[in-house]
Amino acid sequence: MMQDVQTTSLFKERSTLLVLGALLVVTVAVTLANLLPQGHPLYVSTFTVSLLGKYLCYALLAVALDLVWGYLGILSLGHGAFFALGGYAMGMYLMRQIGARGVYGNPELPDFMVFLNWHELPWYWHGFSSFPFAMAMVLLVPGALAFVFGWLAFRSRVSGVYFSIITQALTYALMLAFYRNEMGFGGNNGLTDFKEILGADVWAEDTRRTMFIASSVALAAGYLICRAITRSRLGRLCVAVRDSEARTRFIGYRVEHVKLAVFVVSAMLAGVAGALYVPQVGIINPDQFSPLFSIELVVWVALGGRATLYGAIIGALVVNYLKTVFTGVMPEAWLFALGGLFVLVTVALPKGIAGLLRFRQGQARTAASRQEAKA
Amino acid sequence: MNKVNATLKRVRELARPDRVFDFMVPQESPVDTRHGPILYLEDVSVSFDGFKAINNLNLTIDDGELRCIIGPNGAGKTTMMDIITGKTRPDSGQAWFGSRHNLLSLSEPEIARLGIGRKFQKPTVFEALSVFENLELAMAGDKRVWATFTARLNSESRGRIDEVLDTIGLAQEYRRPAGVLSHGQKQWLEIGMLLMQRPRLLLVDEPVAGMTEQEMQRTAELLTRLAGQQSVVVVEHDMGFVRSIARTVTVLHQGSVLAEGSMDEVSNDPKVVEVYLGAPQEEMA
Ligand SMILES: Nc1ncnc2c1ncn2[C@@H]1O[C@H](COP(=O)(O)OP(=O)(O)OP(=O)(O)O)[C@@H](O)[C@H]1O
Ligand SMILES: [Mg+2]
């Protein structure tokens, strides 16, 4: 019998090659255009480079969400929390790099702690002056939270809308906690006034370019990790869990382990996205935990098209580009525009923007078998 | 000296010509049926909000047997399967799989891995996946997360899938998404998924509901073919179908066994007739 099981390697897949190719082209083109002299017609400003870098971080966050929502069917409405935690871990590193250059010139304590009359660095700030340590925390903190939270929720079989609601509650609770000055994360001002990253000036043009390129590489790596999962047997298992959890259990899989593992991977990717985002926008504050942000993120993925991964990238880029344009013209109307767009796409394009693209192998296969059925 | 002797003995033991190495013996399921039935339920009761869905139920299924279970709506047939597969915990009683495994102390996946396969009343296959992928996922093997991530399809498992595709008559359909199959085909696919796990005991809940006459016939053939290699318990309302496959029939009523025997014995039992007259929508053939 002939077989159609995935035998092509990951790097020969059309969708993967297109995603990686497009990313490479955009990254190289933008970087080169930024290196041109300022008056040149093709010149891209450093501001735009950082803006694009920010979009790429959002895209990585969207890919992470699509992994759990699109494939596993877990609608997390709190993924912004993992993003923000990754961002805070990076922010703490950047704060420690300021050293004595703060307004108060205290070499030991960040400005906001001096302002609060603190005399000692809280224990959980130790180690963050080391870049490798901070990067480990970027992965570990969101990962650990996802692990504990997921372990409790999946073990007691909390799913569907209940799970969505408690993830909203989670991110909301974190937002309230981070607003408090006593938490030691800068209260509602958050962490800002960064100076240096790995010894380089955060605001220097080549640092900005490097961070943009790093975001692009992270997105590519995140996409590859997710794609490696979704095209493996584990990926098919995720779809099985999404479509019939009870059935999956009866054929001998531990559904809660599957959910937990994928949820943790997704949270870590979200953390990486947050960590790359913070130095490019120059601030992280508790608003990043806002429940609304997590919901917006779901809209990106829905608009782009669920369960394709590249759809999430498209959705994040398109919506955030529109947001930038829109908020420049009439900021009050943005939420209405977003809502309208969401309704429009849901009605007209239930598979999202990705539904318009036909290069997906699975779709081609389905179409072919439908033809077979007709014949 | 003693040590040398012991070693020698072990070497001789290893070299015995009538002996095969453990790892070469085909993996048998660890279920022990040498001294009795494959499934044994004793005095099982369960109630939902005071309503006794299962009431002192006793049931024994022998190894390799094909058993039909009939009973009016709400008799507790599905609930009984829930108890066997670990989905529902009884309030009292015992449930054993072979003589070694206490089903009441095991979780659903553990029970599934021991070799009890279940087909639901409503066909549930993974609609978004192809027929082939449905069977692939169901295949017996290491089902932990990492092992699933790194799993590759070898020729042996592909052969196994082909074999099951032939058994269930879906060899032509293997690449179609399960969602587009006909109702009957979905039922067979689900049985195929159970077979991929090489179960010792198959629980099949209403396999022919909604099937055409022809599909029903094929299902009857399939189930009779399967019995013998594994034990099969079929719950069914369709009396014609039950008559065509049944050797022993158990009648369930209000959560306990009302009668047991051959189809003729059972259908002439006055108690059974009465129960079915009380539920006129059942045609007693
Ligand atoms: N989880 C539950 N909670 C409350 N009542 C339940 C539950 N499960 C089953 N029951 C009740 O237990 C009784 C037995 O149900 P069960 O589904 O086992 O019957 P059945 O013999 O399979 O019937 P049918 O032929 O309709 O499939 C029914 O009255 C049902 O309403
Ligand atoms: Mg039933």
Image: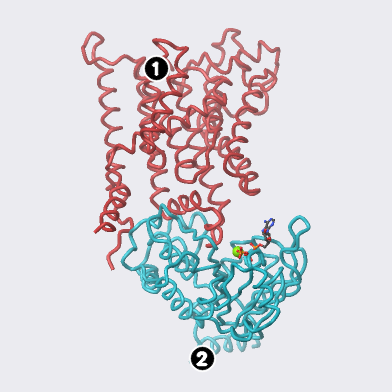
Chain colours: A red, B cyan
Residue A329, percent across and down?
39, 10
Residue A283, percent across and down?
51, 18
Residue B50, percent across and down?
78, 58
In the image, residue A367 above or below residue A108: below
In the image, residue B195 above or below residue B61: above
Cα–Cα span, label 1 and label 2: 80 Å
Q: Do the residues labelled 1 and 2 touch (CB within 8 Å)?
A: no
Quarter of the N terminus of chain A within the rendering: bottom left
Q: Which residue is drawn at 70% across and 65% down?
A: B105
Q: Judge the density around disc 1: few (<14), some (14-19), many (≥20) Cα neighbours within 10 Å.
A: few
In the rendered structure, the answer to whether residue A174 lies left or right of residue A135 reads right
Mark 2 beta carbon near ligand 1 (under 8 Å): no
The label on residue A324 is 1
Nearer to the camera, A209 or B50: B50
Q: In which quarter of the image is residue A355?
A: top left
Q: In which quarter of the image is residue B82?
A: bottom right
Q: Quadrant of ligand 1?
A: bottom right
Residue B42, percent across and down?
73, 75
Nearer to the camera, A88 or A64: A64
Quarter of the C terminus of chain A within the rendering: bottom left
